[in-house]
């Protein structure tokens, strides 16, 4: 039984809902483990250093996410190609896809370090980052950037492994990395007293370990693909397809991260307590979103394999079943947040005012998780079929056209002498409305069905 969990799964056979759940569960646990990186960082920082350091880590998060968008794009492109070629049983194309993805990632890591390192502090200053947390933000980002290869290769290699239907191995590797991260977090912060820099260093080392484990796993999967220097050498057609499929997904994350950075500038105006409250919300939000992201990734692989095999009726069937399951999970999570939210906030800080503010703001967002379940599930189907442009345009609409103007508009309209920057709830209200809009647009474009004509081999 245990051995079968490590074996790639053919998702073109059996009941769709069973394939989706079986594939999603290990990935969900893996995503929860990955979210523990940031959560443990926040708990350790909040408990051992203080709320100012907690705010520093939170302010660095949107910029760090922006640095990772390139690798998210490569990972998305590789995942879609691997799933479709695996479903089509095309060994040669699968081999070149894997080799070229590894090479493109290496080049991208080097370029990113050279370009981004000199810009970190100027960007933080431009975003009105408070002086009290500026140095902590800068050190956190610089260490994360230097260790970007571990984060990059885990995302890319785990995407390749999942594309071949194995979500269990990546779970195991993330659990190992999470244990490493927790131990090193406590050691670097509580024992060595490295502060925020120690949190970043612990995460970099842990993610490097998970990427090494992914490399070892791939080296043991030679029955499905070939590996050697000729497959690592860039081939124009495969690189172009990786970029064509992955660029929209990377841009989607870039759009989201850019919106976060722009909104972060507004957030910073509301003071250190509000910044720290948003950090706490993001950590709880990260766990609440995990089922949505997990079902979205599972449905990407499911759609990719079935589109590669030409089974479009099965894709549609899986889309309905997977979306219903995802919505059910999100509804349950929303109930848990509303019932136990205050206790969840108290895990991160002993400051009662921070707990109360975080819980109040979290209640505004709670219902939006059901909307995100629809967006992630149907977007996953479209991406797996090869249509990565439509989710990108929807993201552009919901963030740039909707969320940013809403946040700043509500802030402006609610200004008073007592509240010179307006009501701080503008951040959460704008996010909730953008989530609902995203679900509506995604459902409309999915039903139009143009994603059915986007397969790689068409």
Image (tube, grey):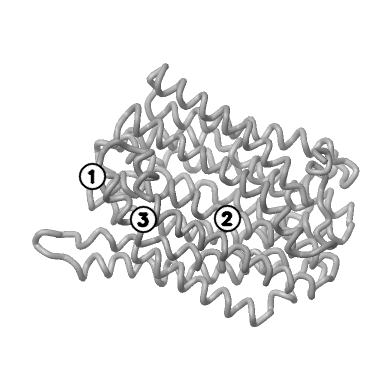
Label 1 crowd bin: few (<14), some (14–19), many (20+), radius 10 Å: few
Residue 442 visible in the snapshot: yes
Of residues 332 and 412, the one drawn nearer to the viewer in this rendering: 332
Task: Tell me the CA gap for discs 2 and 3.
Answer: 18 Å
Of residues 6 and 132, the one drawn nearer to the viewer in this rendering: 6
Task: Tell me the CA gap for discs 2 and 1.
Answer: 30 Å
Q: Which residue is mark 2?
A: 291
155 displayed left or right of 274 = right
The answer to whether residue 111 is above or below residue 253 is above
Of residues 112 and 379, the one drawn nearer to the viewer in this rendering: 379
Closer to the chain start, of discs 2 and 1, is 2
247 displayed left or right of 10 = left
Closer to the chain start, of discs 1 and 3, is 1
Position of residue 308 measured from the top left corner of the image (x, y, whole percent): 82, 65
Residue at point 53%, 61% (across, down):
330
Label 3 crowd bin: few (<14), some (14–19), many (20+), radius 10 Å: many
128 displayed left or right of 292 = left
Q: Which residue is mark 3?
A: 362
Q: Quadrant of residue 451?
A: bottom right
Find residue 353 and name its label.
Answer: 1
The answer to whether residue 240 is above or below residue 43 is below
The C terminus: image quadrant: bottom right
Label 2 crowd bin: few (<14), some (14–19), many (20+), radius 10 Å: many
The answer to whether residue 191 is above or below residue 92 is above
């Amino acid at each position: 039984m245990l051995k079968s969990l490590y074996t790639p799964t053919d998702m073109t056979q059996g009941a769709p809902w069973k394939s989706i759940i079986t594939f999603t569960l290990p990935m969900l646990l893996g995503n929860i483990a990955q979210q523990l990186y940031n959560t443990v960082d926040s708990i350790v920082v909040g408990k051992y250093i203080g709320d100012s350091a907690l705010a520093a880590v939170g302010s660095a998060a949107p910029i760090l996410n922006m640095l990772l968008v390139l690798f998210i794009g490569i990972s998305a492109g590789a995942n879609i190609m691997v799933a479709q070629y695996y479903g089509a049983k095309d060994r040669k194309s699968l081999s070149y896809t894997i080799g070229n993805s590894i090479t493109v990632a290496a080049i991208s890591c080097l370029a990113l370090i050279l370009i981004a390192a000199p810009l970190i502090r100027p960007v933080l200053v431009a975003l009105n980052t408070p002086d009290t947390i500026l140095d902590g933000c800068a050190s956190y980002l610089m260490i994360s950037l230097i260790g970007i290869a571990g984060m990059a290769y885990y995302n890319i290699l785990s995407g390749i492994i999942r594309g071949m239907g194995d979500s269990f191995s990546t779970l195991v590797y993330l659990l190992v990395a999470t244990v490493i991260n927790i131990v090193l977090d406590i050691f670097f912060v509580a024992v060595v007293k490295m502060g925020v820099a120690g949190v970043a260093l612990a995460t970099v080392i842990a993610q490097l370990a998970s990427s090494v484990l992914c490399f070892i796993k791939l080296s043991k999967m030679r029955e499905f693909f070939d590996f050697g220097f000729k497959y690592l050498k860039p081939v124009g057609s495969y690189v172009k397809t990786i970029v064509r499929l992955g660029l929209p997904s990377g841009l989607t994350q870039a759009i989201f991260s850019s919106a976060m950075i722009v909104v972060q500038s507004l957030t910073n105006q509301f003071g250190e307590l509000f910044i720290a409250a948003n950090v706490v919300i993001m950590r709880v939000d990260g766990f609440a979103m995990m089922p949505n992201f997990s079902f979205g990734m599972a449905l990407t692989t499911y759609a990719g394999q079935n589109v590669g095999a030409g089974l479009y009726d099965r894709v549609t069937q899986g889309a309905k079943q997977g979306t219903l399951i995802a919505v059910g999970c999100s509804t349950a999570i929303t109930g848990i947040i509303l019932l136990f939210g205050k206790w969840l906030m108290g895990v991160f800080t002993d400051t009662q005012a921070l707990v109360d503010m975080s819980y109040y703001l979290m209640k505004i967002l709670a219902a939006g998780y059901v909307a995100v379940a629809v967006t992630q599930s149907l977007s996953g189907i479209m991406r797996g079929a090869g249509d990565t442009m439509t989710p990108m345009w929807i993201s552009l609409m919901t963030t740039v056209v909707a969320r940013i103007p809403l946040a700043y508009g509500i802030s402006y309209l609610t200004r008073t002498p007592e509240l010179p920057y307006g009501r701080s709830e503008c951040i959460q209200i704008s996010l909730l409305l953008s989530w609902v809009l995203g679900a509506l647009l995604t459902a409309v474009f999915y039903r139009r069905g143009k994603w059915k004509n986007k397969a790689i081999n068409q």
